[in-house]
Amino acid sequence: MSQKPNIVFILTDQQRLDTIAAHGFDHMITPNIDALVQQGATFENMYVTSPSCAPSRASLFSGTYPHTNGVFRNDEPWNYCWVKDLAEAGYRCVNVGKMHTMPIEGAFGFHERHVVENKDRDHPNLPFYLDNWDKALHARGAAKPSRVSYAKRPDYDTSLGAFVWEQAEDLHPDVFVGETACWWLERYPGDEPFFLQVGLPGPHPPYDPTQEYLDPYLERDLPEAILDYDLDSQPAPLRALRQNHLTEGHDAVVHLKDPTPEQLHRQRAHYYANVTMIDTQVGNIISALDARGVLDNTVIIFTSDHGDCLNDHGHSQKWNMFEQSVHVPAVICRPGHISPGKTIPELVSLMDFGPTILQMAGAPVPDWMEARTLSDLLFETSAHPRDRVFAEHSDDAILTETRFMTMIREDRWKLVHFVDCEEGQLFDLEADPKERINLWNDPDHADIRQKLIGEILTWRIESARKTQGFVQMLADA
């Protein structure tokens, strides 16, 4: 059997930072992810490149920023995916669950794709397709819950997208994806190294755990929503984003202007319980690797594409640059190679997993990649950490009142710039970790504001220089 490590890349959808007990969030129940944390390394400051599903994932799987690869919305086509480089390096490449590619079931270098997409796709503007979960539900004579069916409930307008999964547990999308991944590990007869990407659809809304997982959270002390903020200090595009959510529900979430403490607690209980359901599937995947006899030669990565505000700052879901949207959990475990219980405080970008995986697989890393390997930080070998991280969003169907939003995080500072708005955001994350006080117009912080805006300009210029090879590769394709 090959000594190249197998790689299992578990990517959840919309999982915020405060969702793993071993990271100090004792309201959570996550024993299996906790074990990965204890046996592996945690990136404490992992930031996404975009607070939305497809842009974040296209960036992750190309090693380039959205402005380089051109994917700003969920319906824009992907033009490169480094999975093909893994396949060329001798890996069996398999996707089970969500990747949010476009085309939805395109190969993108995988030998097999067993696609499961968003929980709620029941909207007339979304493309029609039947994924593996749709087919499983149909085969069992079950109807998939969606905003259309949930809207018939008398509590739909007051539930904030939180509902109990009432069908068979094995038909829940996170259970279905987890069990399918385990089934593949049990059945696949080959002995070449494999790359198994497991895309769990939760805890993206609807927030839909089974009652068994929900019950422990209903009476639990949970983090309270950040509500002591000044809405008028938020830039106009974000005020418009909030109004969009109040006017039209997305993903079966009816956003409310002033939810009660009970409604907020209930929403969070459902969300965190969904994470615990996911934790069970992580444990099952680890057990399946062990049963296959490959656990000791497998790299396991656990992270998410972006987070969820859960009413923090008055916002629903994401599409903004608050910490709850752009700062995500990230853990990597490889027995005998990565020091157990290691914490890495440096700023890193989610797309940095791309070259890291390629290096571990012995595959070449393209020199035009804007992503940087995490190996130096993991193994403390001549590390040159990032001084700053960036995220961006543009031309979105929900964030409609700006053409382009950019975030820079450097040291203690975070700045959010809008290309078409004189307003913006500037936070001192050391003095104000909950981002309550916007310093954008504070004359005492004018110099740091201008410095960070200048850093955005420099980054975009350097990005254009760095990625000439990527542009030429696409032109030659």
Image: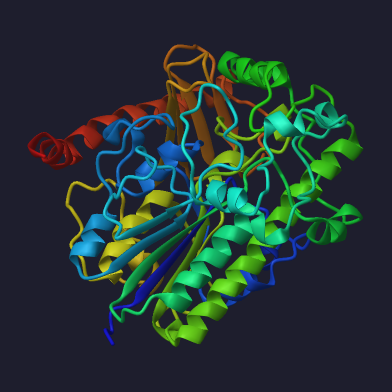
- Foreground of the two, 37 or 8: 8
In this picture, residue 158 sits left or right of residue 208: right
Q: How is the image coloured?
A: rainbow
Indicate the quadrant where residue 20 lies: bottom right
Query: Dividing the image into 4 quarters, which one contains the N terminus?
Result: bottom left
Q: Report the residue at 25% width, 63% height from top.
A: 86
In this picture, residue 90 sits left or right of residue 218: left
- Which residue reaches farthest left? 476
Eyeballing the image, is 50 above or below 241?
below
Query: Dividing the image into 4 quarters, which one contains the C terminus?
Result: top left
Q: Position of residue 248 (x, y in %)?
A: 67, 19
Work out whether residue 97 can be spotted: yes
Eyeballing the image, is 169 above or below 207?
below
Q: Position of residue 202 (x, y in %)?
A: 62, 50
Eyeballing the image, is 411 above or below 238?
below
Eyeballing the image, is 342 above or below 131?
below
Q: Where is residue 391 in the image (x, y as percent from the top left)?
A: 44, 36
